Amino acid sequence: MAKVAITAKRQATLPAALCEELGVGPGDVLDVQRRVVDGETVWVLRGRNLDWSWVGIAAKYAKGRSHSLSAIKRSVERGRARGNRS
């Protein structure tokens, strides 16, 4: 288990492996959330630098199509009728 030491100024140095896994580096900000798991308090760390490059990737397939609920339901029903259940 990795350990983190806290300085007198309440600063901490995180292990390199943890920073890599969180995708954070110098100057980045972490979201910290308190949770209770099986009666024990734990803290969840999340990096804020998430990869959002995939957002909008399907826009070219949706262009010119209706996004109304009824149109979506019809599309789902057509897919089910063809046996595309995945």
Image (tube, helix red, strand yellow):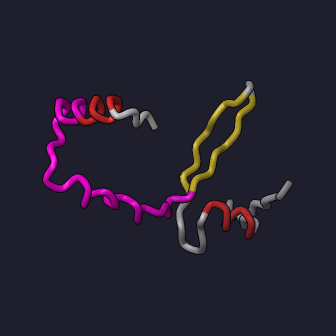
How many discs appear?
Answer: 0
Front in this rendered view, residue 61 or 79:
79
Q: In which quarter of the image is residue 44?
A: top right
Give the image location of residue 10, x and y in percent. 68, 60
Query: Residue sitting at 70 percent across and 30 percent down?
Result: 37
Front in this rendered view, residue 50 or 8:
50
Give the image location of residue 45, x and y in percent. 62, 51
Query: Residue sitting at 58 percent across and 53 percent down?
Result: 46
What range of the chain is rendered magenta? 47-74
Q: Which residue lies furthest to the bottom in this view?
A: 26
Residue 32 vertical placement versus 20 (above, below): above
Residue 55 is left or right of residue 74, and the answer is right
Q: Residue furthest top?
A: 39
Residue 3 is left or right of residue 8, and the answer is right
Quarter holding the N terminus is bottom right
Q: Residue furthest front?
A: 82
Give the image location of residue 34, x and y in percent. 61, 39
Q: Does the magenta stretch include residue 54?
A: yes
Query: Residue sitting at 75 percent across and 60 percent down?
Result: 6
Residue 8 is left or right of residue 80, and the answer is right
Residue 85 is left or right of residue 67, and the answer is right
Q: Quadrant of residue 17?
A: bottom right
Judged by its main secondary structure, the magenta piece is loop
Q: Is residue 52 magenta?
A: yes
Give the image location of residue 15, x and y in percent. 76, 66
Residue 9 vertical placement versus 69 (above, below): below
Front in this rendered view, residue 60 or 48:
60
